[in-house]
Amino acid sequence: MIGKLNHVGVATPSIETAVALYRDVFGATDITEKRALPEQGVWVCFVNLPNAQIELIEPWGENSPIAAFLAKNPKGGQHHVCFEVVDILAARDAMRAKGATMLGTGEPRMGAHGVPVIFLHPRDMGGVLVELMETPRAAH
């Protein structure tokens, strides 16, 4: 059921500062432009790696869902891991049947990759916030 690791989400108070780290320290050269996702309350930027991505996420607005995370972790840190699934609704239903709790309503919403996503509560996932995203069509 679970597909490949798509990305690791890293919350940061400043995408620009985080980009400098990945570029200047790690030598990353394929980094997307920062863009707003107001419907999710975040700014995002992707560091493209040979086998996955690092999603840098910065609060957008005062009601950003990562504001509480950054209040506890002012320098930022690993926020979530994201795995691809073929069918987001089937994955959601299977996870619910196994006792997993969805964040929010449990209804998929559009993610940063332009495909439906859901988040699974860390208390049911070994302490890790897990994002499931439908595999982008170009990857099928």
Image: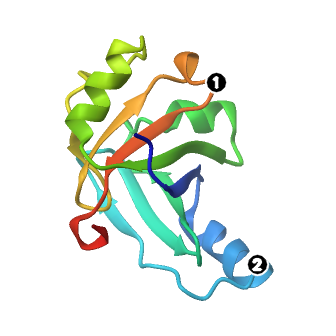
71 versus 84 height, above or below = above
- Residue 88 figure quarter: top left
- Residue 52 figure quarter: bottom right
Query: Mark 1 Cα within 10 Å, few/some/many (few <14, many 20+)?
Result: few
Residue 25 percent across, percent down from the top left: 79, 78
Residue at image x 52%, y 57%? Answer: 7
Element under disc 2:
loop
In front of the other: 2 or 38: 2
Residue at image x 49%, y 36%? Answer: 130
Element under disc 1:
loop
129 versus 74 height, above or below = above
Give whichever of discs 2 and 1 has the lower sequence position.
2
* Residue under numbered circle 1: 127
Confirm whether residue 102 shows in the render. no
Q: Residue furthest bottom?
A: 29
Name the residue type under label 2.
Answer: Phe
- Residue 93 figure quarter: top left
* Residue under numbered circle 2: 26
State the CA–CA distance, disc 2 to disc 1.
27 Å
Q: On the rendered structure, is 23 left or right of 62? A: right
Residue at image x 21%, y 34%? Answer: 89
Residue 106 percent across, percent down from the top left: 26, 24
Image quadrant where one finds the C terminus: bottom left
Q: On the rendered structure, is 82 left or right of 26? A: left
In front of the other: 34 or 105: 105
89 versus 136 height, above or below = above
